[in-house]
Image (cartoon, rainbow, N blue to C red):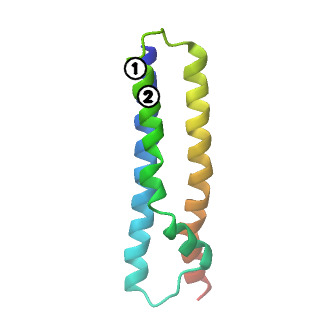
Amino acid sequence: MKKFTHVLIALTFAFACLSLWSMLTVLISVAANGSVMLPGFTRLCLAGRPLLLVLPVPVVGYCLYTIFRRQPTEQNSITTFLAWTMSALCLVFFPVLIAVFLPCLKLMER
């Protein structure tokens, strides 16, 4: 059950990163069709978009390590793994959320 929890956390983190990457990809296609220049912070986040695809790799690697190691998994390691992954997700989620909503605010000013 403890190993299943590690897999569930890793899948949630990977899905969230892929969702953020797709939000930024949609923003690129919307901006290409519009005549409005994107704000600087949004362009900065768009430049870091490939990081969202690389971010789940160490998480999945650690998950595989905990599945295949011979020692029993401790409850403390699950809590630490959850805390680290969700903290990393929050550090990525909020800038992407701001980057997506900045063009909306710019359009509402018009």
Which amino acid type is marked by label 2?
Answer: Cys
Residue at figure coordinates x 42%, y 34% from the top left: 61
32 or 60: nearer the eye? 60
Which amino acid type is marked by label 1?
Answer: Ile
Tell me: residue 22, above or below residue 73: below
Which element type, helix, strand or loop, lies under badge 1?
helix
Q: Which mark is residue 67?
A: 1
Q: Position of residue 32 (x, y in %)?
A: 39, 83
Residue at figure coordinates x 40%, y 20% from the top left: 67
Which element type, helix, strand or loop, lies under badge 2?
helix
Tell me: residue 50, above or below residue 31: above
Tell me: residue 107, above or below residue 41: below
Q: Is residue 91 left or right of residue 3?
A: right
Q: Look at mark 2 in the image and give the residue it sits on.
A: 63
Q: Quadrant of residue 104?
A: bottom right
Quadrant of the frame with the C terminus: bottom right
Residue at figure coordinates x 45%, y 21% from the top left: 66
Q: Is residue 22 left or right of residue 99?
A: left
Q: Is residue 102 left or right of residue 55?
A: right
Mark 1 Cα within 10 Å, few/some/many (few <14, many 20+)? some
In contact (CB < 8 Å): disc 2 and disc 1: yes
